[in-house]
Image (cartoon, coloured by chain):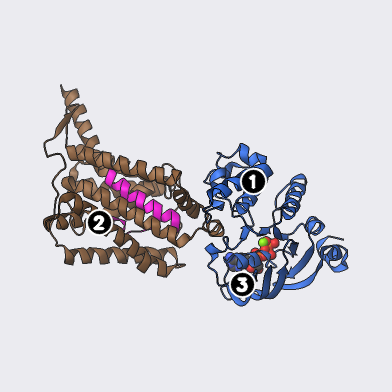
Amino acid sequence: MLEIDRVCCAYGRVEVLHSVCLTVEQGEIVTLLGANGAGKTTLLRAISGICPLTGGEIRFEGERLDLVPPHRRVERGIAQVPEGRQIFTALSVEDNLRLGAWRRSDGAAIARDLARVFALFPVLAERRASVAGGLSGGQQQMLAIGRALMGSPRLLLLDEPSMGLAPLLIDQVMATIVELKRSGLTILLVEQNVSAALSIADRGYVLETGSIEIAGRASDLLTDPEVASSYLGM
Amino acid sequence: MRASAMTTELLQFTFSGLTVGAVYASVALGFTLIYNASHVVNLAQGEFVMLGAMSTVFLAAAGLPLPVAMILAVLISMVAGLALHRFAIAPARGADPIALIIITIGASIFLRGLAQIVFDKRFHSLPPWFGAEPIVIGGAAVLPQSLVVLAGMLVVLVGLWLFMTRTLFGRAILAASNNPMAATLVGINVPVIVAATFLISSLLGAVVGILVTPITLTSYDAGTILALKGFAAVMLGGIGNPPGAVLGGLLLGLAESFGAGLISSQYKDAIAFVILLAVLLLRPRGLLGGAALERV
Ligand SMILES: Nc1ncnc2c1ncn2[C@@H]1O[C@H](COP(=O)(O)OP(=O)(O)OP(=O)(O)O)[C@@H](O)[C@H]1O
Ligand SMILES: [Mg+2]
């Protein structure tokens, strides 16, 4: 479904992704792991077009994605839940969700998706008229996921959705991700919470300073001594 | 008797202060819209006011009916707004704030020069909408046109507020101002939104410029001082804060009017700058609070 092919990215003249290759198949949860500053966020930004490529290409459903302008990638079927949530703090919860559907014009389907998001996260329905900046961290994370879902994506990119959340909430977010997979969504999940991510993923990649160092089935990675020693604290 | 004469006088100052204040408020609001969406401090904002007023004068002089001249003039100002974005701001994307400010100063000098050539260097007025006979309100003599300016400003404010809060496009503008990266992620074309703020700001400036010309007159260089006053109003209200911009504009108008009436009209323009300095020193985030202006 998604093919990252020898992708390079740079901030200014500093290259932070060096010829990264990664694929995501339809219906999978793939997790991208790695230490701080490895380049995980940058890779998601490259997929969404926020960071332009300096080399390589990205294909989505067989077509070149990196040639599509950033603001038109949602309608291709890719939505991102960015690192740090990045909700529209000054707008209401409902406005955040409606803007998630900015590129769509199918009113009835938008209404259906809004109802679906409210069913998935009832607290958002309760607080639909509140200013989003006033939500708690966990609620903001739900809003960020809800907003991405409102774009009606086929591929969902999640950047550290567990960051800053209490353990109970982390479990809840992971359960939601599994539920989304069951509903037919394909997921690329960036996480620092390695055990949580590997426990729900089908496959995983480990990025180290801009290069993929380890790749494999999630169950294998969980028992991989190298992964265990560097990321699971064993 | 003395007391009531005093009250009348104060009422008089209030009306004239609010009228001029409405113009400052429109310029300040235009500043704020553009600043929020793009972090550009557009010092050419006053030229939109001038272009609206001067174009109306000359289109009317060319024989067009006044209402048609006004509408065309607003459109001319909006074209200038779009052109400013398209040819001066958009190509400089990613430039540092000081460079962008210099670009807008350059654009303002250019528009002023163009106006001097296309129009002329004289002062012009427009006929007031409902005659020049003052209406007496509470003993104060008020020009009917003052009421037109205030009503026009109110209509524009309510219209803008409804647009921003009730339409998805308006909320997209707010979203792009609030978080441009997230806006791009949901599919909002942020450069188009920024262009839209230039369009709205030029509309705002032109409308108020046309309404106030029967009272204040206009000339090719009327925009310069308005941009400075508008900027002072923005600082007074708190940069990036739309209600603050309107409040700042009205307060500045009132301060000038009372200062001129009670102290001396010689110092009218100085008042804006004294206020600007005082705010920068005492309350750098403005009365209603806003982002601190980025140190450049
Ligand atoms: N906007 C930026 N400008 C310049 N350098 C950046 C920028 N964002 C990230 N970097 C650098 O690029 C490298 C990769 O950063 P990135 O944010 O992609 O890492 P990450 O794997 O997501 O880290 P984390 O786990 O902390 O989120 C880091 O060295 C970082 O310092
Ligand atoms: Mg990151």
Residue on which disc 2 sits: B223
Tell me the element at label 2: helix
Q: In which quarter of the image is the N terminus of chain B?
A: top left
Chain of the residue displaying label 2: B
Residue on which disc 3 sits: A63
For label 2, the crowd category at 10 Å Cα-Cα, with few meaning under 14, some 14 to 19 and many 20 or more, is many
- At a point 16% along the width and 24% down the height, the residue shown is B2
Mark 3 → mark 2, Cα distance in angstroms: 51 Å
State left or right for residue B277 relative to residue A100.
Answer: left
Residue B240 lies in the magenta stretch:
no
- At a point 30% along the width and 55% down the height, the residue shown is B227
Mark 1 → mark 2, Cα distance in angstroms: 50 Å
* Mark before the other along the chain sequence, 3 or 1: 3
Identify the colour of chain B in the image: brown
Q: Do labels 3 and 2 share a chain?
A: no
Q: Which of marks 1 and 2 is in front?
A: 1
- Residue B63 in picture, x, y percent from top left: 11, 56
Span highlighted in magenta in the image: B22-46
Residue on which disc 1 sits: A117
Q: Is residue B264 visible?
A: yes
Residue B36 lies in the magenta stretch:
yes
